[in-house]
Image (spheres, rainbow, N blue to C red):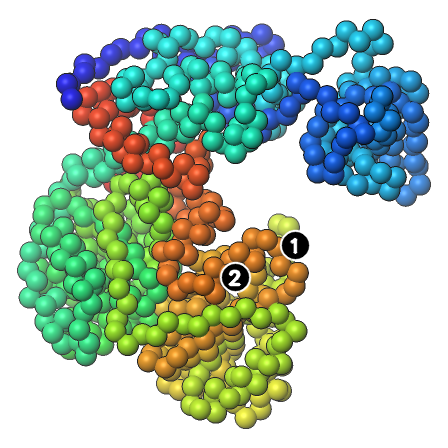
């Protein structure tokens, strides 16, 4: 493709960056309220896209209304009833020539509104019809009182409904956006994508006008679904902006140097000493890591693998690449329970090879903490395992060459970068980064949310693992499960009983309240099962226990001194007890697919046939039913992740606030997944042919909200 010179666009800068003060009626106070929402320029209002539409271009006869329909109707007031007892309510009955009657119901109203609804007055109302006490009704419709001369015409286009801006009414917001659109430049000034690269799609100007002012003949179904060609054009550019932004971060990271770790002797010694062979997938991923670590550029690789696929062994081999070069490696986990599990595994593997390990968590205090910090700072500790405590001030590494972060999605991006910075104190050199997750990331998310990472997949389970049989049972069959546990434990097997939230915490109480409610549920279940199964040794683990208490119970369970472990979701990751073959998850309908799959992964880790029982409270919502059916049908973590993305959306799958995944204005990673290959091609072409246009696309859609701190 011929190289195209970067083209200046002064008109866009002049028009798009114009302050909102130029709009009629937008004084300092209103401008301040818009700015609080990030709306400061005309371009900001152009990209303030509707979240839905209202069809006021036609009238539906009242006699033809169906429950659940969102419609516009017109009729004359037949009767008005205002209630005063208990709580105020206003009911207005209207009728039209179709001989249908509809009630407009208001719970919040002023006396002036009541006076508007005189018998015989013509009223046009818009809302969703639903069954009421005396036929169909619309609760709190939007409405207009009409003149008798019939001069009020219908709308020419669908009415956009915009995300609310605090302190500004919807009518005023629509007026400001309409005024901003009146100043929209022509295609030559607005368009940043060359025509060949957007073949088959409308121009940006055409797309914006269509989305904000859809004509009467527009496909309302497509607009509401987000699949209209105009929306697809905007989604393409928004996805492109985020992709380019991440690639820019990657380029910035490559400007730093990283230590060359080219000595595999210790890693191979570990591999040869293991009581089991590596799977083909483990060996392939280690080869990818080894190639990255041997280069003078900082590695940033995401290793994802299903539950039990053996990521920790691969991470240990990567850590030994750093140790063999006389440097340090650090592994950070989100919880003390998981970090302690890693410490136990790494100690068993690495200490026989002469590697010196250190442990650091929040509970390590006083002289013990000072001693650990000294070992880390001097370099005497070669591999350091811990929690968030590794990122705190006062933790200094002598020569950190590899930072490993487990369960990446549970950390904020800045936390991951803070650990990286522990190795950057000596100048431009930064440590390599390896991030791991046992929560499979759907390919569509990996292509977008992790475009700045190289991705490796351990897609093979170690031999000897048996698929977990999954069933869903109603709470009414709980007594059967108690007997099933009795039988399994009598045969020398072990079981989990996982308790989740039964009651939601009150609004504003936060995660501490949720943890307390979970702990109470687990305590109650523990007491019930202890009474029902007196012959079994039953243990209890929940998030409000002290770390030492939790670890002690887990150690007893792993050693076989506990038959049944009652626990909250603290056991979601990192717990490996091959003898446990039965998992019961209570209130399973309350959990997402990924978390259910993680919990199920605590069984099926040995050669015995294992089962997972999803205990639910009826009736099930449609979404909950689909989740449970998916778990019953599949053990494939990646298929489950794709279904989870469809059901919950990217923000919940990745944990938007935890990962730094930006909220999209219009694009939807599940719905628009088919655009991603084209987005990648566009990003390649723009970064090569027109870097200035690429920068302006990022500025247009993201502005200063950079998703990842410069790496």
Q: Label for residue 42?
A: none
Circle 2 Cα neighbour tier, 10 Å, few/some/many (<14 / 14–19 / ≥20):
many
Q: Name the image quarter holding the N terminus.
A: top left
Q: Name the residue under label 1.
A: 506
Q: Is residue 363 visible?
A: no
Q: Name the residue under label 2.
A: 628
Which residue: 6% across, 66% down? 265
Q: Is residue 397 above or below residue 447?
A: below
Which residue: 33% across, 26% down? 698
Which residue: 41% across, 77% down? 610
**Residue 632: where, in percent of width, then height?**
47, 65
Side of 329 where 81 appears, left or right: right
Name the foreground residue: 138 vs 375: 138
**Residue 558: where, in percent of width, then height?**
38, 81
Circle 1 Cα neighbour tier, 10 Å, few/some/many (<14 / 14–19 / ≥20):
few
Label 1 to label 2: alpha-carbon separation: 27 Å
- Of pointers 1 and 2, the one earlier in the residue sequence: 1
* Quarter assignment of residue 321: bottom left
Q: Is residue 147 above or below residue 502?
A: above
Side of 140 where 618 appears, left or right: left
Q: Is residue 582 above or below residue 571?
A: below
**Residue 267: where, in percent of width, then height?**
12, 66
Name the foreground residue: 407 vs 375: 407
Q: Can residue 456 be seen in this view?
A: yes
Q: Is mark 2 on a helix, strand or loop?
A: helix
**Residue 538: where, in percent of width, then height?**
51, 84
Q: What element carries label 1?
A: loop
- The image shows a total of numbered marks equal to 2
Asked if labels 2 and 1 touch by Cβ distance under 8 angstroms, the answer is: no
* Quarter assignment of residue 235: top left
Q: Name the image quarter holding the C terminus.
A: top left
């Amino acid at each position: 493709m011929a190289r195209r010179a970067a083209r200046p666009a002064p008109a866009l800068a002049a028009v798009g960056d114009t302050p909102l003060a130029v709009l009629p009626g937008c004084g300092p106070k209103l401008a301040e309220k818009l700015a609080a929402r990030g709306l400061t320029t005309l371009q900001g209002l152009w990209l303030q896209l509707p979240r839905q539409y209202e069809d006021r271009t036609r009238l539906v006869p009242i006699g033809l209304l169906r429950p659940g329909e969102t419609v516009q109707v017109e009729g004359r007031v037949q009767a008005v009833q205002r209630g005063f007892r208990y709580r105020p309510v206003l009911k207005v009955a209207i009728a039209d020539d179709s001989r249908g009657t509809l009630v407009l119901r208001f719970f919040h109203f002023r006396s002036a509104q009541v006076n508007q609804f005189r018998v015989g007055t013509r009223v046009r109302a818009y809302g969703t019809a639903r069954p009421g006490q005396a036929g169909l009704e619309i609760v709190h419709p939007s409405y207009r009182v009409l003149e008798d001369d019939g001069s009020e015409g219908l709308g020419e286009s669908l009415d956009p409904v915009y995300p609310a801006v605090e302190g500004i009414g919807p009518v005023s917001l629509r007026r400001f956006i309409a005024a901003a659109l009146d100043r929209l430049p022509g295609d030559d000034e607005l368009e940043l994508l060359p025509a060949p690269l957007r073949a088959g799609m409308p121009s940006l100007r055409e797309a914006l006008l269509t989305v904000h002012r859809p004509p009467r003949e527009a496909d309302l179904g497509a607009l509401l679904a987000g699949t209209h060609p105009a929306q697809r054009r905007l989604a393409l550019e928004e996805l492109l902006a985020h992709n380019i932004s991440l690639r820019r971060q990657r380029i910035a990271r490559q400007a730093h140097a990283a230590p060359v770790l080219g000595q595999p002797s210790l890693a191979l010694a570990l591999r040869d000493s293991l009581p089991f062979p590596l799977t083909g997938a483990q060996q392939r991923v280690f080869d990818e890591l080894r190639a990255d670590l041997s280069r003078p550029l900082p590695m940033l690789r995401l290793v994802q693998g299903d539950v039990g696929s053996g990521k920790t062994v691969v991470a240990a081999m990567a850590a030994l690449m750093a140790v063999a070069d006389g440097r340090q490696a650090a592994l950070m986990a989100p919880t003390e329970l998981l970090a302690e599990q890693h410490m136990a595994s790494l100690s068993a593997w690495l200490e026989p090879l002469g590697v010196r390990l250190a442990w650091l968590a929040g509970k390590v205090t006083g002289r013990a903490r000072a001693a650990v910090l000294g070992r880390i700072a001097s370099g005497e500790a070669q591999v350091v395992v811990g929690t968030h405590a590794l990122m705190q001030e006062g933790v200094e590494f002598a020569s950190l060459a590899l930072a490993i972060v487990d369960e990446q999605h549970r950390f904020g991006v800045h936390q991951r970068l803070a650990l990286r910075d522990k190795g950057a104190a000596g100048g431009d050199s930064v440590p390599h980064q390896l991030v791991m997750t046992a929560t499979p990331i759907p390919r569509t998310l990996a292509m977008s949310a992790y475009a700045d990472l190289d991705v490796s997949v351990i897609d093979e389970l170690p031999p000897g693992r048996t698929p977990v049989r999954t069933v869903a049972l109603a709470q009414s069959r709980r007594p059967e499960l108690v007997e099933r546990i009795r039988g399994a434990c009598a045969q020398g097997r072990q079981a989990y009983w996982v308790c989740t939230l039964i009651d939601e915490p009150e609004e504003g109480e936060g995660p501490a309240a949720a943890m307390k409610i979970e702990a109470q549920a687990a305590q109650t279940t523990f007491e019930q099962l202890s009474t029902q199964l007196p012959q079994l040794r039953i243990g209890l683990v929940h998030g409000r226990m002290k770390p030492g208490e939790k670890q002690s119970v887990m150690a007893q369970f792993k050693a076989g001194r506990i038959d049944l472990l009652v626990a909250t979701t603290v056991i979601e990751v990192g717990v490996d007890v091959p003898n446990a073959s039965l998992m019961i998850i209570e209130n399973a309908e309350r959990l997402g697919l990924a978390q259910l799959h993680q919990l199920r992964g605590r069984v099926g880790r040995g050669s015995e046939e294992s089962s997972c029982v999803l205990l639910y409270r009826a009736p099930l919502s449609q979404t909950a039913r689909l989740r449970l059916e998916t778990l019953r049908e599949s053990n494939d973590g990646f298929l489950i992740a794709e279904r989870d993305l469809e059901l919950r959306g990217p923000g919940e799958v990745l944990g938007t606030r935890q990962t730094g995944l930006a909220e999209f204005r219009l694009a939807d990673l599940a719905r628009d997944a088919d655009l991603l290959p084209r987005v990648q091609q566009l990003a390649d072409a723009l970064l090569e042919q027109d870097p200035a246009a690429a920068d302006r696309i990022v500025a247009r859609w993201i502005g200063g909200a950079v998703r990842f701190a410069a790496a």
